[in-house]
Amino acid sequence: MSFATAMEVNVEARRILAVSISKLYASRSQRGGLRLHRSLLLSMVMRSARDIYHSSRESELASGEQPAAEEPMDTNCDPKEKARLAPEPADSSADMAPEVPDKDESDCDVAEDKENHSPTKQSRKRRGKASAAPDFLPSKRARLEPGEERYAAPPGSCRAGLGDSLSALSLNQVIPAF
Amino acid sequence: MMAGPGGGSSDVQWCFSQVKGAMDDDVAEADIISTVEFNQSGELLATGDKGGRVVIFQQEPESKSQPLRRGEYNVYSTFQSHEPEFDYLKSLEIEEKINKIRWLPQKNAAHFLLSTNDKTIKLWKISERDKRPEGYNLKEEDGRYKDPSTVTTLRVPVLMPMDLMVEASPRRVFANAHTYHINSISINSDCETYLSADDLRINLWHQEITDRSFNIVDIKPANMEDLTEVITAAEFHPNQCNTFVYSSSKGTIRLCDMRASALCDKHTKMFEEPEDPNNRSFFSEIISSISDVKFSNNGRYMMTRDYLSIKIWDLCMETRPVETYQVHEYLRSKLCSLYENDCIFDKFECCWNGNDSVVMTGSYNNFFRMFDRGYQQDVTYEASRENSRPRSILKPRKISTGGKRKKDEISVDSLDFSKKIIHTAWHPLDNIIAVATTNNLYIFQDKLN
């Protein structure tokens, strides 16, 4: 994939992710409750967008471009996660992109489990930029309909992987949804 | 330009007959039509709306003075079927929107139908009253009790004719059996049972018994994280009372035999067409989700509707459909925009004509499409006020997909995606169709010569 195309795909994937997330939020306040079918389709699109985003970043990196500098995770990280994240800058840039998605998956599962058992541990939240704008996702765990838990996962797994610009991009869409 | 398919011959001409509903541009949300269904004789046509109301139209008998014109459909009964409810445990509002109406086969003078919203199914009895008793001994005509000391004679009350009154009364309420949102109900040919399907489960009910139902399909995974597909529609076979099908969001249809086991999680047949790798796109999964499944009247075929196409399956062949019809292939390159404006989630329905020779489904811009299976012809019509002069013949519409737009063609970019035809119904015996736009019901019939 040429760099130009990878960039386009990258931008498109992020846009679709942002649109999907705002749709997911909008559906929470819909009359009749969360629709399982719609939520499932949204999460499938989000997963595809995330996969495409990551694979296009890989080809960006492969063609020698530096990825946008990742903000350090918020200071409330678990020490365990800090230790995992710390070695990252030391790694070669080529290793970073493939590593991140794997981490995302395990982090996401672990993070979600954590969320299930102790709602206070919001380790993935970007508190650093919170003063400027609302959190990317609400800290209060929403009411659940059976099946809703499932769909907390994709946003969680997206958060770590995306650059800042996505959170800035999507906030404009997320805010009206509230 | 073909005259239009229908009834197995290619010379059917469709004409506007009637339009029901308010004609102003401001559509009240409660008036949005959410389901349309003819009864088995075609004499009655029921619609349900987002406000929880059911309106039933009855066809007038053909008049002797105009023998070649079919009777018009006029309002027969209107009633509030479902009200909004609140689930206190989950803090969720339950919408009153009527998702489906299904008529029971008629057994006596009264008519029965099942109507359902997201959570509750109701059996309604619609009956006529054209006589009332008069001449009570103890009551006045207005219902007040007489002073007994003024009663000096006895008489037998007699039945006197009165203006026809059509009453709708709820006879059964089938509640609390669905955790997820009900998408289908289907009446069994055994005339005793029916099924209801939500996103993850299908329940079997007896028409008389409301306090219990049998779960016959359950696709809920042990861990909801593993959820990959949901049930999108279900239907009983028209004459095999042990057979039903359900479609999924992954584009598969499973046929189940209730004789095989009590819980039909293991399908008897699975119908699935391998994906065309050339058509693989970002939104492939969404557009393969089946929005409707309908058996043919003869029970040998079934039809499925996904976002861009209609597929006809022979029940004996699971590997691929026997016929595929593109409804609006020109939308394939616009899936991203359709995702953004939510249209990609629209759940179009489809229907067969009485002898299974033609199938019909809706599209955008108030277009609807008919596919003649025998003559391999297809046609696009539009339900619009402009074509609403009595008995005006519908002109086939064409969408221009290439660069050059011919006269009378509509370009894809000028299609109005807010005007969609989701619900359509075909009279079981005759060439009469009911097509619902957002809040209007159009009735078309073929021109009788």
Image (cartoon, coloured by chain):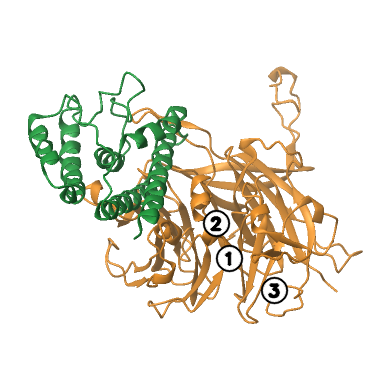
Residue found 68% across the figure and 64% down from its top: B400
Say which amino acid is labelled 1. Val
Mark 3 / mark 2, whichever is N-terminal: 3
Q: Would you name the residue on which mark 2 appears?
A: B348
Please identify the residue farthest to the front as the structure is shown: A64
- Tell me the number on the disc at residue B6: 3
Chain letter of mark 1 equals B
Residue found 21% across the figure and 48% down from its top: A97
- From the top left corner, tell me how far across and down residue B89 is, in percent: 33, 29
Q: Would you name the residue on which mark 1 appears?
A: B327
Judged by depth in the image, the label closer to the viewer, 3 or 1, is 1
Q: Judge from the rendering whether residue B172 lies leftward or rightward of residue A6; answer left or right.
A: right
Judged by depth in the image, the label closer to the viewer, 3 or 2, is 2
Q: CA distance from mark 3 to mark 2?
A: 20 Å
The chain assigned the colour green in the figure is A
Say which amino acid is labelled 2. Phe
Chain letter of mark 2 equals B
The chain assigned the colour orange in the figure is B
- From the top left corner, tell me how far across and down residue B300 is, in percent: 49, 77
Both marks 3 and 1 on one chain: yes
Query: In the rendered view of the protein, which quadrant contains the C terminus of chain A?
Result: top left
Query: In the rendered view of the protein, which quadrant contains the N terminus of chain A?
Result: bottom left
